[in-house]
Amino acid sequence: MRNGTCWLDDQGHTIQAHGGMITRFHEKWYWYGENKDADNCKVNGRLLSRVDVRGVSCYSSDDLHLWHHEGIVLPAEPTDPSSPLYPGKVCERPKVIYCEHTGKYVMWFHSDAADYTLANAACATSDTPVGPFTLQKTVTPNRRDCRDMTLFQDEGTGMAYLIHSGDWNKTLYLSQLDETFTDFTGVCFEAFPGQEREAPAFFKRQGLYYSITSGCTGWAPNSALYAVGQHLSNGLKLIDNPCEGEGCHETFGGQSTYIFEDQQRYYLMLDHWKPMDLRNSGYSILPIAFEKERMIIRWTDEF
Ligand code: GAL
């Protein structure tokens, strides 16, 4: 898989799982993401940097390389203009975690109006990792807006968080989920107040919490920053750009979307957005290295 390009599934079709995540359920890998398999929208002949909502795709794999399309597990709802899955809206950055308490797979995604002024989070659940997912609700978590977001489950405590850019992207919020993972406890931590970080990806390693985020420049790449902390509640401390080498100031042309772990190694997933041809946006997966305290990410041509 050549980093920075579109990848193909086991049928030779481009993988449509943008703004996504790779995770493991029962020894199998699953990749969820935005299906953007449509032409960019046009208004009066002018091309826009959006595609209509098609839904959330799921792919499965045994080896992280050969991916099988399990289908659109949360499809668009073209007949219902009030649905967050109506094609003219926005459904981005879907993430899925398993809830032991209810036995459900719980998906959250960024749900918005086409002009991004709604800034909601939406939740859907399924009995299996490959769907079908049923939409449960659309909310503003703890009355805060939600744009770029991710899910993070703290294995130590079992608590899960919807982590979302709020206050018009000024501050990142960690909204704690209740035991069903479909609602909030009301506990909410702030991270990076006033720092305007988005595209959050979180992980925990050797007892420390880490995040990688991007700046806010829309589809255009910018410098990533990593942060570290001993407690989620205190807010993590922003340290530096983890990327090194050519292209490091633009995250190698990509934007963070998720970090997954395999055999105690951590991998950063990036989207390489093509704003005027979104369906052909590329992917890369880069290993995260640690040298003493410092996090380092270097470009590799292949994953
Ligand atoms: C980016 C964000 C993407 C998408 C895009 C729209 O900042 O990370 O997920 O929302 O803006 O312009």
Image: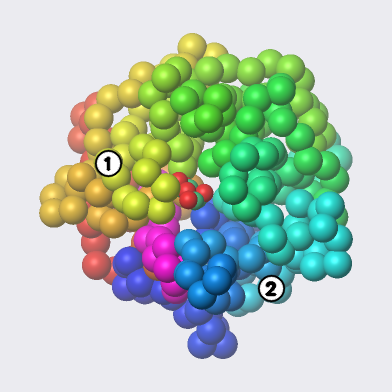
Q: Which mark is residue 70?
A: 2
Asked if the magenta segment contains residue 280, the reply would be yes
Q: Earlier in the sequence, mark 2 or mark 1?
A: 2
- Residue drawn 39% across and 65% down? 274
The residue where tag 1 is placed is 223
Q: Which residues are magenta?
A: 265-281
The furthest residue to the bottom: 11
Quick one: which residue is furthest to the front in this view?
A: 44
Query: Quick check: can you spot residue 113?
Result: yes
Q: Residues within 10 Å of mark 2 (few under 14, many from 20)?
A: some
Image coordinates for residue 179, horizontal then vertical, percent:
80, 29
- Looking at the picture, does residue 102 appear above or below residue 7? above
| Amino acid type of the residue tagged 1 in the rendering | Ser
Callout 1 crowding tier (Cα within 10 Å): few <14, some 14–19, many ≥20: many
C-alpha separation, residue under disc 2 versus residue under disc 1: 34 Å
In the rendering, at what x and y percent does residue 298 appear? 22, 51
